[in-house]
Amino acid sequence: MIVITTRTGAMTGFPLSRHDIRIALHSMLSCLGLSGAHVEVILTDDGESAQLNREFLGCYGPTNILSFPAAGPVAAPRQEPDSPPACRKDSSHAEDDTDLGVLALSTGAVHRESFLYGQPPHRHALRLLAHGLLHLAGYDHGPQMDDMTETLMQCATGKAAADTVVTGF
């Protein structure tokens, strides 16, 4: 189950609807073998992002996305450090009701960074959601997470294109 909470004004000009976010996250979770997992997404503004960043990470200022795992890592264990990321539907976590945790996405950061990186805002928003979701699934920064982020982007945009729900990818 995916729960999306929006703070006042956070959706103003945001490039994805709540439905778009649900479709994309369902596709990403399926790709991870976590189809039945619970994820909460909070769409927030820079002020709340800065407050959460300071309170939980001790950093000042807003950030793009924060991940608050509900429990320990749930991603499929990796046999070797150089092995490709796990992305399969037969994962032992498939179709369960695992509570992965909460993602807090700053909509202001999506707009700023998409301009900075020259990406369409809807693609950058999806990339940040994929990044945050991977943290909830137990991935740490590095080449494997980068590769998996691209894989999840393909899962999300392919699913959205097939359903003709989210356009512009």
Image (spheres, grey):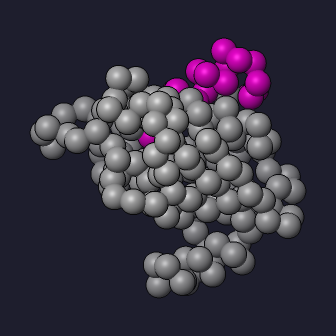
Q: Residue furthest front?
A: 97
Magenta span dominant secondary structure:
helix
Depth check: give the residue in front, 153 or 18: 18
Q: Position of residue 76 (x, y in %)?
A: 28, 39
For residue 12, which quarter of the picture? bottom right
- Report the magenta residues as a range: 149-168
Query: Is residue 113 visible to us here?
Result: no
169 vs 88, left or right, is right
Does the stretch in magenta take in 158?
yes
What residue sits 38% from the left and 44% below the top?
A: 146
Q: Is residue 15 above or below residue 12?
A: above
For residue 107, which quarter of the picture? bottom right
What residue sits 46% from the left and 60% below the top?
A: 70
Q: Residue furthest left?
A: 80
Quadrant including the C terminus: top right
What residue sits 85% from the left and 52% below the top?
A: 13
Quadrant including the N terminus: top right
70 vs 82, left or right, is right
Give the number of marks: 0
Does the stretch in magenta take in 111?
no
Depth check: give the residue in front, 14 or 74: 74
What residue sits 53% from the left and 64% below the top?
A: 66
Q: Position of residue 108 (x, y in %)?
A: 73, 63
Query: Is residue 169 visible to us here?
Result: yes
For residue 104, which quarter of the picture? bottom right
Q: Position of residue 78 (x, y in %)?
A: 20, 40
Depth check: give the residue in front, 67 or 122: 67
